[in-house]
Image (cartoon, rainbow, N blue to C red):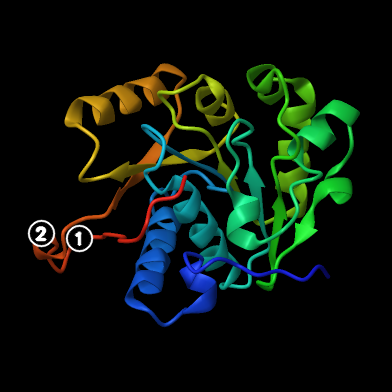
Amino acid sequence: MLRMTPKWNLITQLNPKSPISEGYRMLRTNIEFSTIKQKLQVIMVTSSKPSEGKSTTCANMAVAFAQTNKKVLLIDADLRKPSQHHLFGTSNRNGLTTALFNQKGLQDVVQHTITDNLFIIHAGPTPPNPSELLSSEPMLELIEEARRKYDVVIIDTPPILSVTDAQIVATKCDGVVLVIDSGQVSKELVLKSKASLEHVKAKLLGVVLNNMNRSQVNSYSYYYDSAADG
């Protein structure tokens, strides 16, 4: 196994008893019980714009699911500005683009993490045509292979309003979690993000409000407070 040094904002791994880690466990539970009719196996995480914390949320969600003894695969499909290799302290030399360009299987690009049951595919080298790669048949085949081999697949994508990549990936997923920086993103942008997901008939599972003022949070609210990174 590779030596890894996860960053401090991978808090569910470094400090699982913290209030923020408990918040991620609440998020995991809310996702699991968000529908009783459809199995939620492949979950996409996105945001309205950059630097809202969607990559940190994505990574901590993956750890939270793995801590329930489920076999989890985290895929960094943000091919333009990947973050997961920074969060997990692993190499981005090979990854999703390697698999899609060379038509390799999961076993050739999956890396272990220090969290039991959690595996990761990094973005890999930046391609000239991210949208075309994500909409390709090899991408669909890779996700279907992941469905067969893992209990939960979590996919990190670029912001929904920046490029079409997130809309493309959303069509291949069972549900989407939208991360919103409560202090920086307007209601109009949030509604536009929601409309973009609805346009491709994606299922919006819910919204994570990032950087909420604790004085605004009551006992029935979910919030997550950390430095946004992706």
User: Badge 2 is on which residue?
Assistant: 216
Return the x and y of residue 122 as percentages of the image width and height: 70, 46
Q: Which class describes the residues within 10 Å of circle 2: few (<14), some (14-19), or many (20+)? A: few
Q: Is residue 22 left or right of residue 95?
A: left
Distance between mark 1 and mark 2 Cα atoms: 9 Å
Q: Are marks 1 and 2 in contact (CB under 8 Å)?
A: yes
Task: Report the amino acid beneath label 1.
Answer: Ser
Return the x and y of residue 180 as percentages of the image width and height: 31, 42
Compared to 28, does 179 lie above or below?
A: above
Q: Is residue 121 left or right of residue 66?
A: right
Q: Closer to the N terminus: mark 1 or mark 2?
A: 2
Which quadrant, please, contains the N terminus? bottom right
Compared to 133, does 213 lie above or below?
A: below
Q: At 38% from the left edge and 60% from the top edge, which residue is drawn?
A: 27
Q: At 44% from the left edge and 61% from the top edge, which residue is drawn?
A: 28
Q: Is residue 225 left or right of residue 101?
A: left
> Which quarter of the figure has residue 24?
bottom left
Return the x and y of residue 171 as percentages of the image width and height: 55, 26
Task: Report the amino acid beneath label 2.
Answer: Gln
Q: At 30% from the left edge and 61% from the top edge, which residue is drawn?
A: 225
Tag 2 secondary structure? helix
Return the x and y of residue 166 as percentages of the image width and height: 52, 28
Q: Observer-nearest residue: 187 or 50?
A: 50
Q: Residue furthest left?
A: 215
User: Badge 1 is on which residue?
Assistant: 221
Which mark, residue 20? none
Q: At 84% from the left edge and 27% from the top edge, which residue is drawn?
A: 101
